[in-house]
Amino acid sequence: KEAETQTKLANVVVLATGGTIAGAGASAANSATYQAAKVGVEQLIAGIPELSKLANVRGEQVMQIASESITNENLLQLGRRVAELADSKDVDGIVITHGTDTLEETAYFLNLVEKTDKPIIVVGSMRPGTAMSADGMLNLYNAVAVASSKEAHGKGVLVTMNDEIQSGRDVSKMINIKTEAFKSAWGPLGMVVEGKSYWFRLPAKRHTMDSEFDIKNIKSLPDVEIAYSYGNVSDTAYKALAQSGAKAIIHAGTGNGSVSSRVVPALQALRKDGVQIIRSSHVNAGGFVLRNAEQPDDKYDWVVAHDLNPQKARILAMVALTKTNDSKELQRMFWEY
Ligand SMILES: NC(=O)C[C@H](N)C(=O)O
């Protein structure tokens, strides 16, 4: 009987990349002062014996870094490993443990390029495992629960933090000191409670199986950079980024992705030189940038990022530029993904 239930469990692979979920502090009181990326994947899994009731779980250490240091090469390496595992008949679901600082970028990247309907869950924690009320254990338990569930198939890359199931496309780190850190302007897709998931809505944007992008066809990612806007901003950063080889610049704009009159001439000139200009917004609760609102995008041949924040806009721009450098095509992709 025991053996029978064992064989029915889903096979879930935990790909560990580091972050605070693998962090360690000097004392249990250190919830904010600690070193990220210290604990190995075997130890993370062994720390939660209850996982064995949810799935057959095995771990792989893909890298061991704090996520603020992730590079495009790291993204590609992770993406390729995820694709290999997703292609394997022996794998039913994939969990990626990740630092929270760039978790939203990696989750969105995988959401765009992984051609699978198998569950891919990205998870992190706000406190290291050594701290009182550490959140990593439950977040990881929830990630494995969702990864091993039938209902999570075909819903794109997901993020399980603070008992919520979020779309990897929409979710963003909104605060750096609370365990309730990850939010989406459009709300979570569901909840996971005591190892069971409860769903309320589905992602509307193209992802995974329905995406025109495939990690297997992406050899490298082009240089896309972000320039931040504010009162009295100068055009120095924009020009410098273009000069250093950026193929597209994400304008992390004020409000509705608005552009200072001090910067507009430089952006017009850069576009004429072939650099793609993509207007996003750095407003905290989620921007909503529309074409030809605030700036004449049609006239200047600029692109708008719509509701994608600057760091997510950078991910889509890089992936999109592997296929096209046509601004109209880029804009279509920014509406569809
Ligand atoms: N909470 C965290 O995971 C933060 C850490 N700096 C990281 O992103 O790796």
Image (cartoon, rainbow, N blue to C red):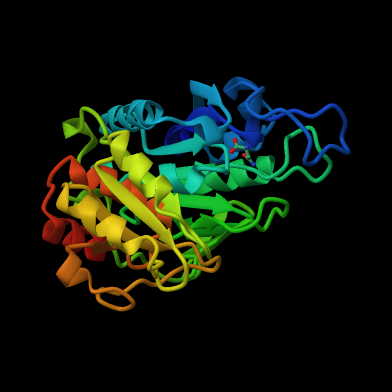
Q: Is residue 141 left or right of residue 202?
A: right
Name the residue rendered at 35%, 53% in the picture: 250
Task: Please tell me which residue lies in front, 75 or 289.
Answer: 289
Q: Is residue 111 left or right of residue 200?
A: left
Residue most extreme to the bottom: 293
Percent position of residue 248, x then y: 27, 47
Above or below for 114 versus 36: below
Task: Please tell me which residue lies in front, 282 or 207.
Answer: 282
Question: Is residue 36 at all visible to an observer of this figure?
Answer: yes
Above or below for 201 versus 268: below
Q: Would you identify the image quadrant in which residue 93 lies? A: top left
Above or below for 335 versus 65: below
Q: How many marks?
A: 0
Question: Is residue 1 at all visible to an observer of this figure?
Answer: no
Name the residue rendered at 52%, 62% in the picture: 232
Percent position of residue 221, x then y: 27, 34
Q: Is residue 1 left or right of residue 267?
A: right
Percent position of residue 155, x then y: 35, 56
Name the residue rendered at 34%, 77% in the picture: 294
Name the residue rendered at 58%, 24% in the picture: 41
Task: Please tell me which residue lies in front, 179 or 316.
Answer: 316
Percent position of residue 76, x then y: 33, 30
Q: Would you identify the image quadrant in which residue 90 lies? A: top left
Quarter the C terminus occupies? bottom left
Specify the quarter for ligand 1.
top right
Task: Please tell me which residue lies in front, 13 or 16.
Answer: 16
